[in-house]
Amino acid sequence: MSMRTLTVGLGSRSYPIHIGPGLLGQADLFAPHLQSGRAVVVTNTTVGPLYADAVERALDACGTRHFRIEIPDGEAEKRWETLDRVFGSLLRAQADRRTVIVALGGGVVGDLAGFAAATYQRGVPFIQVPTTLLAQVDSSVGGKTGVNHPLGKNMIGAFHQPLAVIADTATLDTLPDRELAAGLAEVIKYGAIRDLAFFDWLETNVGRLRARDPDALAKAISRSCEIKAEIVALDEREAGPRALLNLGHTFGHAIETLEGYGTWLHGEAVAAGMVMAARLSARLGRAPEADASRLEALLRRAGLPVEPPELEVDAWLDAMGRDKKNESGRITLILLDRLGAAAVEKNAPARALEDFLAGR
């Protein structure tokens, strides 16, 4: 399987997404972005021992001086205290504004290291090297960075685009089954919001994806990144259509916040959230019941939860009320018109939402 390169088109800030096996050690992919001659690899205690040496050999081949920062693994570490540890390491090493941060890991590492890059000395360059399926298809692309707050997911952050995304699909060989399934939730999301033909393909090939067939994974990753790159190029800072990428996330982020970060993986919460969004869409007469059932069935086959935890209505509304998409005190939802077509709903009937959350 050969490498494929896509482009996120943002004018002078456009950047490549390289997708394929064996990319971690390809110095030529890193070299164009390392003119400063200095880099720091930010990773975690799980990914670092597996893959940091390969990245650092590539940096050596580029003649780049480098050091490594390892943070603990897990969603619970996506917090201000861990970010401050990264800042401390950068300062002690006298990293300057041209030092390139290389984010090696899943979504937590990418978001946290990216936020460090966005804010350290008011902004330094960084490269995303995602090692999980979820990060390769979603969080590494588009420039969203940040950390969680006890009251809300991803509530502290910044937009900061990477210089490049280097997605080595061979890293998925060591990904636990639960993490692979969590990534499939985001893959399925892309078909649900924008590409019915891709959704159809996923229904046919979900077994191959769960079995880690390299060709199927390469296609799923490439098409997911294509869709995200198209939407980000249209709306970098989520003023309009980029919000469609959040199908299931308003409900899902509430689940993660209320259940405790890391109890549900992000993709698991998004899967249950997408089913909730589809069911609500059907209840409101926006989407066919059959489409909601198809989405639920595919998520089940991907090994994902489709039922949310039992939570009080007031708890749901309080957590959803802090969602970043909200305006003027009203909860903004991403709903389906049909499979392959989602829409931003800023005026969902409040009573209908409350009744839905109450199971009425």
Image (spheres, rainbow, N blue to C red):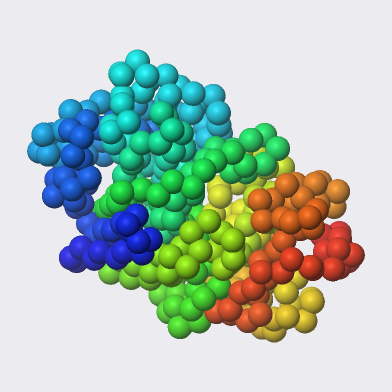
At horizontal 42% and vertical 69% (from top left) the residue drawn is 230
Q: Residue at x 89, y 65 (%)?
A: 351
Q: Which residue is drawn at 72% across and 61% down?
A: 332
Placement of the C terminus among the 4 image quadrants: bottom right
Q: Would you say residue 5 is visible in this rendering? A: yes
Q: Which picture quadrant has residue 344?
A: bottom right
Q: Give the total of numbered labels.
A: 0
Q: Position of residue 105 (x, y in %)?
A: 37, 42
In the figure, residue 55 lies in which quadrant?
Answer: top left
- Nearest to the observer: residue 72 or residue 151: 151
Residue located 67% across and 41% down the image: 152
Quadrant of the image containing the N terminus: bottom left
Q: In this view, does 240 lie above or below 158?
A: below
Q: Is residue 190 left or right of residue 60?
A: right
Q: In which quarter of the image is residue 153?
A: top right
In the image, 25 versus 84, the foreground residue is: 84
Question: Is residue 177 among what the camera can see?
Answer: no
Q: Where is residue 327 in the image (x, y as percent from the top left)?
A: 74, 56
In front here: 58 or 182? Answer: 58
Residue at far top of view: 92
Given residues 341 and 205, the one toward you in this image is 341
Question: Does 197 sit left or right of 331 as displayed?
Answer: left
x, y percentage for residue 42?
35, 33
> Looking at this rendering, what residue extends furthest in the front direction?
12
Position of residue 233 measured from the top left corner of the image (x, y, whole percent)? 43, 65
Residue 296 drawn above or below residue 41: below
